[in-house]
Amino acid sequence: MSPQIHRIRASATVFLALSASVLRADESASVVKSVERLPGNVLKLSLDLPESRYGVVERGQTLNGPWEPVFVARGAAGPVTAYDNFAYDRSSFVRVATHDVAAPADTDGDGTSDITELNSLGTLNPLNPAPPIAFVNGATAIVDRAGYEALSHRDNFPGAQNIREVKIVIFGVDTNAPQLYFVNSATHIYHYLFAVALGRYPNNSTFSNDTYFKDVGRKNLAGSIVAHDNYLAPDGRQGIYTMEFWPTDPVAFRFVEKAYRLVSAGMPFVRGNLAYHPASETQRALFNSEAASYSQSAIREIFAEELFGNVTYAALNPGECYGRLRLITGTETLSVRDIAILRTIPNDLTHVAGILTETQQTPLSHINLKAKQNGTPNAFLLDASSHPEIAPLLGQDVYLKITPDGFEIRPASQAEVDAYFDAIRPTTPQIPIRDLTKTTIRPLSAVRFADAGAFGSKSSNLGELRSFLPAVTPDGFAVPFYFYDEFMKFNGYYAEAAAMMADPGFQNDPATREAALTAFRNRIVKFGILPYWMSTALGDIQATFPASLSIRFRSSTNNEDLEGFNGAGLYDSYSHHPGEGHFAKSAKQVWAGLWSYRAYEEREFWRIDHASAAMGILIHPNYSAEQANGVGVTKNPYLPGPGWVGHYMNVQVGENLITNPEPGSLPDEFTIANLSGSGGPEIQYIRHSNLIPAGQTVLTRAQAVELSGYMKTLHDRFRPLYGGDANFAMEIEFKITAAGTIAIKQARPWVD
């Protein structure tokens, strides 16, 4: 029996008003009972199909075709639902061809009937001529989310860490019968390994992966379907799947369109919630050059700034913790036993048990660097304080678990809280190295990595950096720990600190402790006296700077910028402006900073001996009117491992800091790498600064490439000094000066 054809017009402007009508006079009844447009312009059809029949939904751009099969529906006793998942935003046509189950067609022309393939959907697929494969290798269709998860593995993509991905391979993408496979990505971590397992990869040691999947006369295509479950669409839909390709792969529109159609039909449960994500400079440029073709197609595209700018949740540091859940709206005193909900990202934050922010963070903000260092669970959660699972628990002891997919929270007992902190806190005191044998201020040119015990890692690392990258490193001086120690002894402050710390009120009440430390710092700054020799030494280096120049005084302690403990944001820096008098004022401010509440709490938790802590000072000319500032890591944390080369950067325009951003400020965030198959460094933007016009970037490409070169040189120098393994990386802070040049002002081991 020949198939019966039932046509309807699927114009986005009119199809909602249509009931299905039979267009052929010889048909005795209507199969298509109703038509509905779903979010994303997906067409939902309600069919009247008996169990003895099945229907193939076909799409065409004209009433006379050609027709493309997009969905196969089995008949049933009641209404049957079918879809056209490849949505059209312009006029198109849909028809339903019905067939007898007893005399099935072979829609994909692979020699196997539609009914046989429907009965083994996944292993087979009536819309995909790909030969069957074992599930351990992959599938030809994914019928639901559970099937997607079964084939997925977790991987890192720029902008999203530990996210679900299913790889796809399309063989014969240049033909009229392409074969789509959804790769079992837990079995095959690389596309070519899948091709090898299927016997489709050439047995030739000189044949490269790039040649196979990216040759000029493209025959095969490799990509990924990535589940961004925490994306919130403008229409209110939660979650999106993106189709992505290797960053340096210039996939032309005709292949993107073919892949998009195949995946839409092969993952019917996605219901149009699929978007092509051109993730790199190469792909964005190619997309722009073919914009007219995309605008005339039904391909939904999404760019990084929307994909990562419209998320409702992001786990920056997964983990679990116990503590008291508190909403922080101002200057409340916090302790290590608090789980803080922060409406805005603060300029500083003491050690806490857990962090939830209601504004987006970047991985290189001080708040997240400290979370990584301390093992503190940290996440962004939109409207966290009013979340129905969280709001009722405010003020209570809770258990909080942060995972890549979401969070878990419940009430906790005092015994659970106490046991947790007993388990995570060190059991023995830690005595930091304090070398007091270096008694003079040194120029940075005379300080090296090995001098950290006397000057602090911040000064010693910058001195080391200046020895091989002097053009991008500030010149200045390093004041040794000896000066701090002599100042504290000369004024009797060690004894005063010991008495303060022994007070029961100081020990037992965070607010009392914070007030006492504030008063102690004020006494140091206002009433501390420098020995004559010390005042003379600081005066001598002050005389080397022009009187009109602003000078930066920066902390350099023996308990920060260390491997495994960077102390991000613990200590303050100060600018000594013209007309402020002797350098003694700024030196006392830096020394007093050793006794800030957040620094004290951090040392106390890690059982670092307070009396052994020491403060050096790094002194150099202040930067002003800089064009940009940023933070970078000398590896790509989204694609870690020895086989990957690249760097990760956050950069913001002007003087708006990355480490302590202004409320609502989001920087340019990107990776840069010499990827396989690339003709040069490839940049992948994750998001763009919201402080500059759309379409612009904070750094020029030339600046980003130049900075990346310095970062590689820096990485290669410091890695052996720290005895770093293949995963070692350095974190830098940098600026684009008012003159447009690069300046690196800090380098320390990346704690991840």
Image: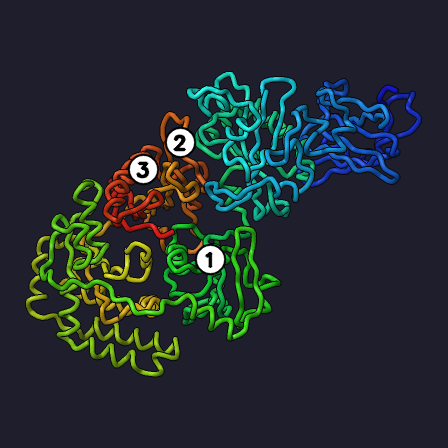
Mark 2, residue position: 675
Taking the image as shown, residue 590 lies to the left or right of residue 297, namely left
Nearer mark to the viewer, of 3 and 2: 2
The residue labelled by disc 1 is 378
- Residue at the spot of label 3: 708
Q: Position of residue 257 (x, y in %)?
A: 60, 26
- Which quadrant of the structure image shows residue 347? bottom left
Crowding near pointer 3: few (<14 within 10 Å), some, many (20+)?
A: many
Using residue 442 as the reference point, say whether residue 204 is left or right of it.
Answer: right
**Callout 1 environment at 10 Å: few (<14), some (14 to 19), or many (20+)?**
many
Q: Position of residue 15 (x, y in %)?
A: 77, 33
In this rendering, the answer to whether 493 lies above or below 54 is below
Which element carries disc 1, helix, strand or loop? Answer: strand
Q: Is residue 662 visible?
A: no
First-in-chain label (1 vs 2) = 1
The amino acid pointed to by label 2 is: Leu
Cα separation between marks 1 and 2: 31 Å
Task: Point out the image quarter for the N terminus.
Answer: top right
